[in-house]
Image (cartoon, rainbow, N blue to C red):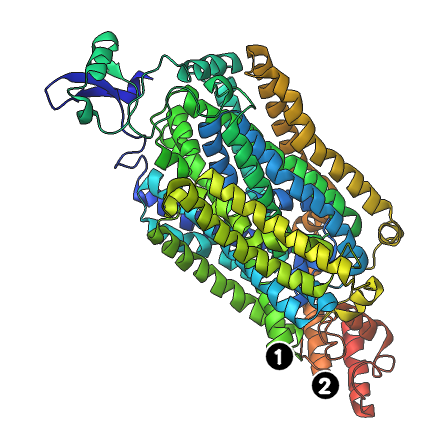
Amino acid sequence: MSEYYSDYTLADGTVVCAKDKDFFGDTSLLSEGVGYAIVLGFGVFFSFLTSFMVFLEKRYVGVNISSEFFNTAGRDIKTGLTATVIVSQWTWAATLLQSSNVAWAYGVSGPFWYASGATIQVLLFGILAIELKRKAATAHTIAEIVDARWGPTAHKVALYFCFLTNIIVSAMLVLGGAATVNALTGMDIEAASFLIPMGVILYTMAGGLKATFLASYFHTAVIFGVLCLMVFIVYAGSDDLGSADKVYKFLDAVASSNRTCVSGELDDYSNSTVMMEHVKAHGFINVWDGHNCGEVSGNKDGSYLTMLSNGGLKFGIINIIGNFGTVFVDQSYWQSAIAAKPSSSYKGYLLGGLCWFAIPFALATAVGLASVALDLPVTAGEAGAGLVPPATAVHFMGEGGGCLMAIMLFMAITSTGSAEQIAVSSLFSYDIYRKYINPDATGEDILRVSRYAILAFGVFMGVLSIILYEIGLSLGFVYLMMGIFIGSAVVPMSLVLTWDKANANGAIFGSLIAQVTAIIVWVISAAAYDGEVNLTTLGKNDPMLIANLVAILFSGFIHITWSLIAPQNYDFSKMASSITLLDDVLPDYEEKEQNELLTNHAKRWITMWGGFFTVVMVIVWPILSVPAGVFSEGYFRMWVYISIIWGVLATATTILLPIWESRVGIMTVIKGLFFNDDLHYRLDDIDYKMDLVMDHLKIPRTGAHHEIGSSFHADPAFRAKLLSEGAKTTTKESVTLMDSEESMYQNAAADIMKQ
């Protein structure tokens, strides 16, 4: 594109036409104020929106925010919202940024391996989700399950890996977000790193997991909306490209072996015969050091249009291993399974995984390849920082594109960030505070500590990202290394609910020994390949690949071997009784839901379909692409059409299905809000008078909603019984009433009934 070339004077006075040194340069497209407006404005907006929706549920649907509800969302989330939440939680900054980076680096194989390599974990996690519902329905965290089965030592190890996973995921969120906001607006990167997590603290503290789910729905809708817009612009709505065929031709031209590529500064070539001959022949220089130019190393025929990519395949393996850790060891995914209805737990994960596949596959195939096809002056450093999508959006839409991309990214960061915050708060509240600090904690205690933990971790996220930025770690580096640190916990976490022979010692030593071994192998491999150890050599594909494989395979070998030698032979029927609810009871599921738990149908269903799509995505699809070699124009067109159709179907599913499934509750709120609000005001007055009555009767207020054995004051069922049957039938459940108090109550209750 001629707009990215300008005259450049060499040291000897020769003037050449050279490609811009980088895309974003030292100036920002948007003002710094826009950055603060997005980071702070959207944070406040969604805080008010989700808090208002939680208020509507409390007022018109009868939801009460107990500690159980705060951390489990009532355990009755339907399939559509479960799927949408999974999409939201799994859409990191890396999903939008790193997926386009690998498209920029490897071509069509990059987005495919990113999408398939990070989808299969969600599909297979559905097996663990239904096993959790069957064997540990009262659990709040995965660490509780580990403790119930393998004891306190394994519990501490599980906590270590869970917290480490939350920290790594949060670091990637903020690193990618801060770098993008800084590049687009010039907002101070440290300020962005600190303020981005603050935007989700308010609504997460107010409504807990349910508020997180509601916010996730809106965030996902925005992300899919932008996805559809960008895909349309690349393939149909722009003069520069506008069709799959044009993208194909431009990609083919960019990877031409006839293209002259230079490295270093142009001044270095002022007296170079080769350089000067090229200048005389063509009148311009193609690239500076770090730009994409010419054939792709390791790809068949150097083409961007092939699945036969050495670098793409290595990335795919690293991606698969690392993402097993960030799903199976991340408390937020276990928490979503806990929150779902039995039938929704496994179906929601399968549907969510398939819908999420569209984001990196469709978006990165369009946006990432468009940046290469347009020959944008994006450097390797900019791509590694996740700036390929913003560059493409800015090219097509100018300031509006930059603003739109910043908003889309903020949606991804806040949705996953809130899930990580509530996950950490649950781990701290139930697995540290309740277990080790205050075993007699009430529901109010847990609720209070959960909110403190959300605030503390939100601040920690900001501080951590600043530290990592100062060290020099990029989004791409952290993404590739995550499996080295947490991959060793995948096998133990997978077997805790699925294999009765799984041994506690095998889980403990397997995960810890494999983690240390993987780190050592990582460093040794970097030194062996490049002769030195630094962030650059550690970040290369080969050391990353070897270390990731060691982490997951060595851990699995130790754990499985130990378990076969000394099997535990655990009785899973004991697990549920080992984990107690605090201030609520399990929902009274319908018979259909109970059957899901009592039979093996659900497990067989998710095993069959999860396994089927896993095999298709990582084996069948890539193999079928091998005979194509370098894609023909028709084959690439088909590839693009598949990505577009998948993206549109995923958009419709995630936006419409939750609304359809929640239509009864939505209508209840609408009727209450616009037609029956006077009735609710009268009910508020009744509630107030009943509070006075029960205070007089000395019915305790301690604890929160449904706190068994200590509080009936806020229990709607108890209040209804008290109102309809009188004090005599309820005194056994609460306090012994004096005759005079009972008479006084009867008069007050009669006054209430007249309203």
Q: Work out whether residue 229 can be spotted.
A: no
- Compared with 411, 144 (above or below) is below
Q: Work out whether residue 748 can be spotted.
A: yes
Q: Residue at x 70, y 41 (%)?
A: 123
Q: Give the left or right position of residue 597, taking residue 677 as reference.
A: right
Mark 2 and mark 1 residues within 8 Å of each other at the beta carbon: no
Q: In this figure, what is the number of numbered marks?
A: 2
Type of the residue with mark 1: Asn
Q: Residue at x 83, y 72 (%)?
A: 721
Q: Give the left or right position of residue 87, taking residue 61 as reference.
A: left
| Of the pair 339 and 294, the residue shown nearer to us | 294
Percent x, y for residue 726?
A: 84, 78
- Quadrant of residue 372 within the rendered picture: top left
Q: Which mark is residue 438?
A: 1
- Compared with 437, 739 (above or below) is below
Local SS, label 1: loop
- Compared with 143, 546 (above or below) is above
Q: Which mark is residue 698?
A: 2
Q: Give the left or right position of residue 167, taking residue 722 as reference.
A: left
Q: Quadrant of the N terminus?
A: top left
Percent x, y for residue 131?
A: 78, 53
Percent x, y for residue 647?
A: 61, 29
Percent x, y for residue 650?
A: 64, 32
| Of the pair 105 and 662, the residue shown nearer to us | 105
Type of the residue with mark 2: Lys
Label 2, label 1: how far apart the Cα atoms are: 27 Å
- Mark 2 closeness class: few <14, some 14–19, many ≥20 residues within 10 Å: some
**Sequence order check, earlier mark of 2 and 1:** 1
| Of the pair 749 and 611, the residue shown nearer to us | 611
- Mark 1 closeness class: few <14, some 14–19, many ≥20 residues within 10 Å: some
Q: Residue at x 53, y 35 (%)?
A: 314
Q: Quadrant of the C terminus?
A: bottom right
